[in-house]
Amino acid sequence: MTSIQYKRILLKMGGEALAGPSGFGIDPARATEVAQIVKDVYDLGVQVALVIGGGNLWRGSVGSTMGMERASADHIGMIATVMNALALQDALERIGVVTRVQTAIEMRTIAEPYIRLRAIRHMDKKRVVIFGAGTGNPYFTTDSAGALRAMEINADVLIKATKVDAIYEDDPEKNPNAHRFDRISYIDFLNLRLKVMDSTAVSLCMDNNLPIVVLNFWQKDSVKRLILGESIGTTITNL
């Protein structure tokens, strides 16, 4: 029997994962597809936590460039992540995966407030936990929220789900000769100013020696294959 490489994971995905063909909004069919991928990993016996962005509904950075006060724009973005979390919770529950949403901004009638030990207890009881509302603070991305929550729940790995199969030194669609990294150190990632993940999130993982794996979420069984020990995507570690 193939052994499981990681027993507890934090899966970070962008809000676009739930969007339809237009790239905006929440598509229930796409939410079901995402939920099935998560369930395939959950069925291995892995404890799963998720952080999902809100870019399919709102981006705080866009609001601020249009003249909106940055903190207000970011707070709207945090609420967008909760909307996505609730949509994904519904999709997971409909396929038999018990799920809890915890939010950094209290919304007691629709979700639990974020409590670290309660989140860990949920996972110990075989529940998937989705963390909404980012860190609860403006100026921090959901990448940073993912890194922070991964540290707090003692995750074995932070998985960044993207549409690209790995980290490249340049955009592979624009530069077909761009170098592909199978492994890269935190320092090299930061020095090269690679844009796949927020530098604050990578720095936090570096300080706490938490490995990051960047992979194509839509590649068949990519997350499941990673959990089972296959070399998938790019790993960011201390090397």
Image: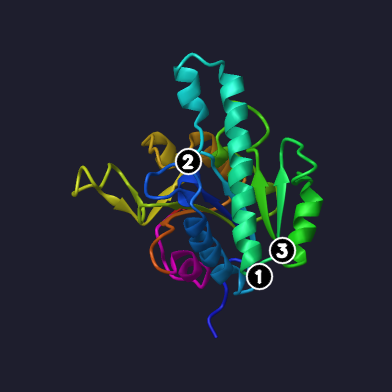
**Could you tell which of marks 1 and 2 lies nearer the N-terminus?**
2
Q: Residue 39 in the image: x percent, y percent? A: 58, 68
Q: Quadrant of residue 128?
A: bottom right
Q: Residue at 71%, 42% (x, y): give it.
A: 103
- Name the spot of residue 60 as percent of width and height, x first: 52, 27
Instruction: Rate crowding at label 3 as few (under 14), some (14 to 19) or many (20 or more) other CA atoms within 10 Å.
Output: some
| Amino acid identity at mark 1 | Gly
Q: Is residue 81 above or below residue 48?
A: above
Rendered location of residue 160, percent (x, y): 49, 51
Magenta region, residue range: 221-234
Residue under label 3, please give it: 127
What residue does disc 1 label?
96
Work out whether mark 2 precedes mark 3 in sequence or the reverse, and give the earlier one: 2
Tag 2's secondary structure? loop
Specify the color scheme: rainbow
Q: Nearer the viewer, residue 59 or 190?
A: 59
Q: CA distance from mark 1 to mark 2?
A: 26 Å
Q: Amino acid at mark 2?
A: Asn
- State left or right for residue 145 relative to residue 122: left
